Structure formats: structure tokens, C-alpha cells
Image: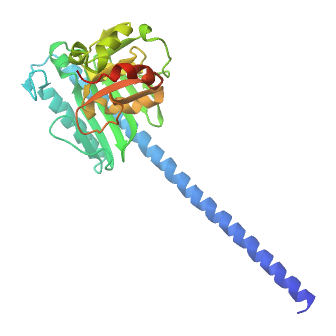
Amino acid sequence: MRLSSKLFLARAKRSESAVSLKMSAVIRFIVLFKRQKVKVKEAFLLENKFHFAKEIIYQAGAFLREHLYDDLDVSQKTSATDLVTQMDRKVQDDLVAKILARYPQDAILAEENGLRHNITDGNVWVIDPIDGTTNFITQKADFAVMIAYFEKGIGRFGLIYDVTRDQLYHGGGDFDVYCNDRKLPAFEDRLFQDFLMASNAGMLQANDWGLADLARECLGVRVYGSAGISFSKVLSGGLLAYFSYNWPWDYAAASIMAKKLGFIVQTLDGSRLNFQTRQPVMMAPKCKLSALKPYLKKGKQ
């Protein structure tokens, strides 16, 4: 083969290789561009859902304030202290109807009417229409509306609306945590004796999980009668921790927001929340878990 032919073939191969590299680069760019486009679209859709959730929870709160002193049809569920009113059912029905009208493919896990759905199965909204129903009935204060949103088991955002104080705690996931328009700071460590804690009254009285012993080390104890109100006070720095027996709709929203501020929501024995049954639950700063363990090891009395 003549030299000119060899040079021609070599140049052709180099040219072909260069074209191949350029094509690979173009393909990679297209793939990355499409992925980025999908991420941007997903973020946009999630932000829309977040704003929608704020709209409907404000509407629920406004309805409850408007009807705060209406005559109530009160009935018992599992015990004389586990109460439900027509307002609980009305608020939940309205929230569910609005969510499914906007997002018909999504599912619901809620306190009333037996609405149960596994949070790992698709897009799931968790609703507590009135958290602290007994407070709502008797005190007309210290109750909350709560909404949490999950995608395949991953918490995307949570909302706790303290209705009579008009304070909305919102965020978590990709969103910063706020109380209304005030961004909440991460947990700032101090000694136990500088903090208040909150608990279920029965657990405290029986010293379940050593909570009465822990209370002696703290500045004091508060019992609010509402998981939502208690969780919100931990989020805002007013409490060190909160301990109670909770259902999934009680802790779902707080479990999402907690992570952004250095807290964790888990069972008192340290196992994961199952989002199915009533469990002994705590919200506490992650950095305080080792200090809490000597008390919590005592378990249920």
C-alpha cells in the first residue's frame, strides 16, 4: 500500500473517532439535559403541591374559627377521652375532597372514616383534621390541623396549623422550616435544666420510660393535650422534647420537619416509626439521644 493511502486511512480513522467522541458527548449532554429537565419539573410540581397544602390548611383553620362556638355533636371513639365531633369529620372530608379533586391519583391516610393507605405506596397525604379535639371542645384553643405529604415513603413536606394563634409551621424535605414567615433556626444545645419538656400525662404519672425521672432533670413539664401543639413548640425551641403515644397522623408532619432542624421523631425504644399503629413516640434533638438513653432504657412501667 502506498504511503498516501495509509495516511488517508489513518486520517479517516482519526476523523471517525473524533466524530464518535463528539456524538458520545452530545448524547451525554442530551441525557443530562433531560434528567435536569425532569428534576426541574418535579421540583415545580412539588412546590405547587406545597403551596396548595398551605392554601387548604388555612381554609380549614378559617372554617374552624368561624364555627368555634357552634353546638357540637360529640361522640366517643375508643374511650371516654377519645372524642370526635362533626367538625372533625367535616374538616377531613373537605380536605380529602380538595386534594383528590386536584390530584386524583394520590392517596390518603387520615384519622377519621377509616382512610388508611401505606405511605410507601405512591403519593400519600396524611391528615389530622383536628388534633386536640378535647381541647377544641372544652377550651376552644390548643388544637391544630395537620397535613403531611409523602412520595414512596419519603416525606416531602409537613404542616402544623395552630388555629387559634394563626401560626402555621411548614416545611421539611427540600423546604426550609418556617413559622408563618419566620425561618426557624436549628436546635441550639443547652443543659437539661435549661429546657422544658412535654409529655402525655398518663406516661408521666406512671413514670413510663423514665419520663418522671427525666422531668426532674429539666426546668419543668408541660402537658398540652395536642401532639401538634407539642411538636410545634419543640420545632420553635420552646421545648427540649415531647413524649407520647401517637398515631401516624399525629406525628407525620412533625417527622418531616424535624430533620431540617436537627431533631428526630422515633419510637421511645429507638426503632423506626411504622406509620400504621399507635406507638410510644418522641421528638428530641439528635444530639441529645445518648443523654436521653439512660432514662428511656427503663421502658414502660
Q: In which quarter of the image is the N terminus?
A: bottom right
Q: Can residue 181 be seen in this view?
A: no
**For residue 240, which quarter of the picture?**
top left
Toward the viewer: 189 or 28?
Answer: 189
In the picture, measured across the screen, residue 4 lies left or right of residue 288, that is right
Q: Is residue 283 visible?
A: yes
**For residue 45, which quarter of the picture?**
top left
Residue 43: x, y in percent? 47, 44
Residue 20: x, y in percent? 70, 72
In the picture, measured across the screen, residue 102 lies left or right of residue 175, that is left
Q: How many marks?
A: 0
* Residue reaching furthest to the right: 3
In the picture, measured across the screen, residue 121 lies left or right of residue 240, that is left
Q: Which residue does the image show at 32% across and 36% down from the upper left?
A: 273
Q: Quadrant of the C terminus?
A: top left
**For residue 93, which quarter of the picture?**
top left
Residue 73: x, y in percent? 7, 24
Residue 16 drawn above or below residue 51: below
Residue 117: x, y in percent? 24, 45
Toward the viewer: 201 or 59?
Answer: 201
Q: Which colour scheme is used?
A: rainbow
Q: Which residue does the image show at 50% across and 17% down from the upper left?
A: 188
